[in-house]
Amino acid sequence: MATRSLRIFGKTNPQSVFSWCSSVSAKRAGRRAARTALYTAVLATLGVAGQGAQASDSFFNDYFAGIPYVGVNAYSPGITLYGAVDQAVGFTKGAQTAFVQQSGGQWTSKFGFFGVEDLGGGYRVRFDLESGFNAANGGFGTSNTLFNREAWVSVGSRNAGELKFGLQDDVGVPLFVDVFGQVGTVSAVAFLTAWVYDLGPGASYEPARLPNAISYSTPWFGPFNGQLAVSLASQGSTAPTVTTRAVALNYYDGRVFGTLSYLGNYALNALTTSSYVRTDNFAAGAVYDTGRYVLSAEYSFLAPRLAEDRVASLYTLGGLYRYKHNDFRAELAYRAVGGFSDHSYGVTLGYDYNLSQRTALYVRGSMIHNTGATPAYGKYPGEQPVVDNISTSYTGANGALENYQSPRVVLVGMYHKF
């Protein structure tokens, strides 16, 4: 996944799922095995590493392939080289029309090193170093930064949970709640979730990856698990000592996944040079999995804590259906700014033809349609959401600055995970 991808995969801790692999009739076993793939992945991403078999025909089994810190090998001692190369060509429409080449229409192009040491007594030390890059030109994902996606070390056990230090994925609604994984090149949900440019100065959204972070994932207590994370200010910074705090409560019973989360993030007030504003984000997400198809929904509420700043609510609904080598998916989103006629409607459609578990051809199309407008906050202008960072501003016939209300993008590409 691109840009804001894979924040869900770093929160692991061992727990067996052998109970899902019991001997039953062939038909029932097939259904149960299909659910096991999502079960294993969910547990691994939220603080538990699964150790059961996964169904070869499950979408989530393919979805998590190539991510070593998720699934059955998440706690196997050794060092693994992994990554993905994703290339797409496409068409964007905003203030101008353009044909583009994109690195990462489904997955961020990246490589990484993941390692595990068995300390005995059920405890293991793990680390991950991951670097994103632009497959179109070979450049760094972030200038002058080698490991811009993951750089952490952790210690944990099945019974004690996992404590993790370093640059790591944030805590909140997992990316798999969006059936497009909140890929930053094409997912309308990705842009609407994190959009704060019409809420006023100081409004912010929690970074997809937390620098200088400490997190803890609890063991699972029946179907429940909790996560806590804080991100500390860099040395010499004038920001509050704790720049980001997050907590999540997760539920998973083998078919239904649900989460409730709170994120509090500090950002510099754009109207000053010294004060910081906290933005609170309350969110909930759910996934219902049947093996053949997946349904998902999410709600997010953003509230900057500065007088006269605005608040925003986001509602999403998604679905995915798999038939043989074909994956069909769709996502709808609606965002509203409280007290203003500022509304955004998003839709993303996709089709994948899976050549193998790690390689696929895909088509994506996405559009955000904006209505109304957000008044300026003093001299601080408001800007409505876009998709794929498409420029929407242009000079109208009367010389006034106007905005294209329906930015859109279409991509055709392929990826390979190794």
Image (cartoon, rainbow, N blue to C red):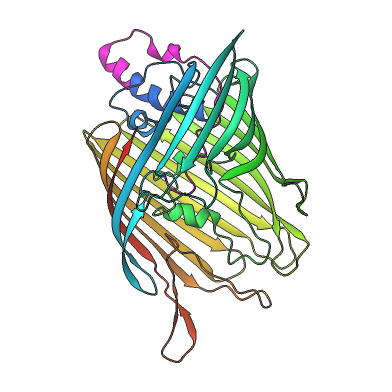
Q: Residue at x 39, y 54 (%)?
A: 186
Compared with 412, 66 (above or below) is above
Residues drawn in magenta: 2-31
Q: Is residue 15 magenta?
A: yes
Q: Quadrant of residue 267?
A: bottom right
Q: Nearer the viewer, residue 182 or 88?
A: 88
Q: Is residue 416 left or right of residue 389?
A: left
Compared with 106, 294 (above or below) is above
Q: Is residue 227 left or right of residue 77?
A: right
Q: Quadrant of residue 95?
A: bottom left
Screen quadrant of the C terminus? top left
Q: Residue at x 61, y 26 (%)?
A: 154
Dominant SS in magenta? loop
Q: Is residue 215 magenta?
A: no
Q: Nearer the viewer, residue 183 or 112?
A: 112
Residue furthest out toward the bottom: 398
Compared with 215, 314 (above or below) is below
Q: Position of residue 297 (x, y in %)?
A: 46, 44
Screen quadrant of the N terminus? top left
